[in-house]
């Protein structure tokens, strides 16, 4: 099974991605994690990517694609994978389609996590991040065991400078403008499924759990899609 997760910041892709990984037994491939892991290992591509993001620049498509291709060559991806953070543009989507075709593979579905803007502002403005290990919390939905401190390393949590309501709304508008062509791209290929991600994590997962099974994940897999997803 090969899935692509789309959705704005705070839509719950990380939380649901972890659940899908456990359910389907395939790894979730995040471009951000790839960058950090390969840079830490001394990979030439990873170091090149780090040289861009250290300067606050976008990593060029050629580097991003190279990193993704290298990661997908690992044996843990043989049974499938979940992509989070790639593709971000129609150009990258075309490259991914070609890359998978060369591997004799194809995408099974693209899940678009749709959330109301006001809901996202509440979610993101309450987010707190560990500057040391990058663990993420929420002041009400997922607070740390000790107020203000990371459960994993004990560092003091911070609020990102772009997690203020005004900054969040600007980011959401930018995301919508940049992602609209990508949504059309996958909709035209009958691969796009809209996930109502406004509810609690359990509610979100329940709404498409049966669909994931029918898309090929689990013992009762079939080729049909659940009515819980709006195509």
Image: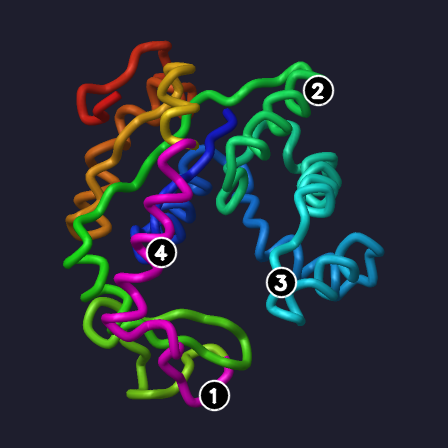
Which residue matches tag 3? 57
Give the left or right position of residue 92, taking residue 187 as reference: right
Instruction: Specify start and end residues of the magenta stretch as a single range.
Output: 153-181
The percent position of residue 146, horizontal first and vertical second, equals 31, 87
Front residue of 154 and 122 = 122
Q: Is residue 173 within the magenta segment?
A: yes
Q: Return the residue found at the far top.
A: 223
Mark earlier in primary sequence (2, 4) = 4
Q: Earlier in the sequence, mark 3 or mark 2?
A: 3
Side of 95 where 141 appears, left or right: left
Name the residue carrying label 2.
Answer: 103
Foreground label between 2 and 4: 4
Image spot of residue 184 (x, y percent): 37, 25
Q: Nearer the viewer, mark 3 or mark 1?
A: 3
69 vs 137, nearest the viewer: 69
Which residue is label 4 attached to? 9
Label 3, label 2: how far apart the Cα atoms are? 31 Å
Q: CA distance from mark 2 to mark 4?
A: 31 Å
Name the residue nearer the viewer: 22 or 159: 159
């Amino acid at each position: 099974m090969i899935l692509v997760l789309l959705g704005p910041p705070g839509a719950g892709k990380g939380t649901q991605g972890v659940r899908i990984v456990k359910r389907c037994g395939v790894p979730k491939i995040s471009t951000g994690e790839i960058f950090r892991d390969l840079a830490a290992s001394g990979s030439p591509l990873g170091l090149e990517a780090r040289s861009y993001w250290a300067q606050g620049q976008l990593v060029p498509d050629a580097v991003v694609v190279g990193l993704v291709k290298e990661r997908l060559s690992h044996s843990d991806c043989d049974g499938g994978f979940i992509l989070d953070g790639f593709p971000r543009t129609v150009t990258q989507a075309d490259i991914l389609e070609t890359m998978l075709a060369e591997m004799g593979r194809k995408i099974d579905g693209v899940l678009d996590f749709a959330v109301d803007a006001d809901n996202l502002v509440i979610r993101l403005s309450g987010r707190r991040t560990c500057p040391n290990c990058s663990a993420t919390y929420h002041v009400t939905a997922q607070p740390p065991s000790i107020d203000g401190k990371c459960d994993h390393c004990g560092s003091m949590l911070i609020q990102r400078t772009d997690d203020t309501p005004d900054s969040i709304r600007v980011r959401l508008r930018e995301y919508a403008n940049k992602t609209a062509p990508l949504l059309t791209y996958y909709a035209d290929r009958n691969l796009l499924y809209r996930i109502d991600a406004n509810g609690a994590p359990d509610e979100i997962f329940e709404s498409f759990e049966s669909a994931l099974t029918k898309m090929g994940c689990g013992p009762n897999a079939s080729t049909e899609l659940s009515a819980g997803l709006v195509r």
